[in-house]
Amino acid sequence: RQAGHLYGIAEDRPVSRTETMKPLLHEIRHNALLWLLGFVPVVFVAVKLEPESHTLLFVLSVLAIVPLATLLSHATESVAAKTGDAAGGLLNATLGNLTELVIALAALKVGQYALVKASLAGAIVTNTLFMLGASFLLGGLKHHVQEYNRVSARMQGGLLFLATIALLIPSAMSVADLAEGARFTQTLSVGLALLLIVAYALGMLFSLKTHRELFASAGHDEEGEAPWPMSLALGTLAGVTVLVALVSEIFVESVQVAAEDFGMTPVFVGFIVVALVGGAAEMASAFSAARKNRLDLSVGIALGSASQIALFVAPVLVLLSYVIGPEPMDLQFWSGAVVMMLIATITAMFVTVGGRSAWFVGVLLLMVYGVFAMTLYLMPPQAH
């Protein structure tokens, strides 16, 4: 009876489709950010009428992804309210990473491996430093001190550290002979990809099945809006995920030319711009959860998304490159990206060890991210 009251649905009568849609329509009417949904059909029309206007399509695709990310945030929060923050964080990270996966697949098909690797490394660093730092900052500005489950944070940090080591090894173990070196790197990359996928699967088994009691939320939920009905939340997740994937394809096709018009280098585009736009859905959820004193969900989304990219998305792309790419892709990243990923991982592990946070902790993480972003923006194109 209480659940029925939360959803605003009487238990003794069937629910009409109009009643089910009421929370979504109410949110669209009262959230000015969702008024940007009008750009979703506009970007599809623009790509048909002006397919060569890459800068225009880039701006329109970004404006379309933002409200879609907001909808994805609300739907995922409603599902997380029923599944718990650990599973909810995993779900949000998985759906949010779909954008990064679509972007990477589009670049993979045409052999733009530099963009693929830059976007993967950038997503790991952005989620670990920017998303986590901004969550700590936004939550800390509203709540004096926030707590979260440090066991969960340590596990995600450990998985991320494992993945960073695996990504560092192919770069460190370089072979002088070009032919032998390429063959060695490709074979090693396939083996590491399989190991990382196994580690990711075992990590999910540990946190969601065998030791799930260790990952209970440590924070205190605020009283907020009632969650959406599960049917509406799942339907919104499915529909918005498809739209995000379609808009992301337009974004990929336009981002490189638009970057030149805006004076941005290719490495900055892959590492910063693609990562920020690709992670918009997860960021909306993480920031909203932090403001509601649900920092477990924020930490789960930020670190869970970063570890999922490193342990699952990157290895899968290596394996898929043998099927859809012009040639196999390896896990050998340029040295600057490896150093940034390693520093980001160690920084996140250091600040999350205590299980408590305040706004200045978020500032520290954002400052580290700012150092990386400034360096990449000023870096000459040929330096990477």
Image: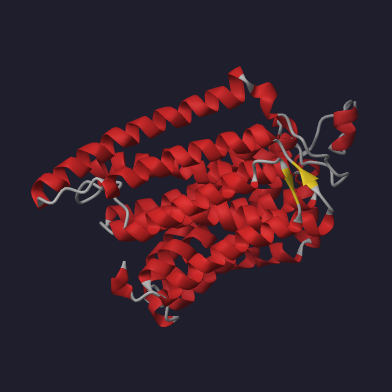
Q: Position of residue 3 (x, y in %)?
A: 85, 30
Residue at point 36% right, 45% down? 167
Residue at point 52% right, 73% down? 59
Q: How is the image coloured?
A: secondary structure
Point out the image quarter for the N terminus: top right
Instruction: Answer above or below: position of 383 versus 284.
Output: below
Residue at point 56% right, 41% down? 304
Most extreme residue toward the top, as rendered?
Answer: 210
Q: Position of residue 307 (x, y in %)?
A: 50, 41
Instruction: Answer above or below: position of 289 versus 141.
Output: above
Closer to the camera, 355 or 60? 355
Q: Position of residue 149 (x, y in %)?
A: 70, 35
Residue 4 seen: yes
Q: Is residue 342 left or right of residue 347?
A: left
Asked which quadrant contains residue 135, the reply is bottom right
Asked which quadrant contains residue 232, the reply is top right
Q: Is residue 139 left or right of residue 62?
A: right
Closer to the camera, 299 or 284? 299
Point out the image quarter for the C terminus: bottom left
Instruction: Answer above or below: position of 47 versus 105.
Output: below
Residue at point 15% right, 47% down? 181
Q: Is residue 151 left or right of residue 124?
A: right
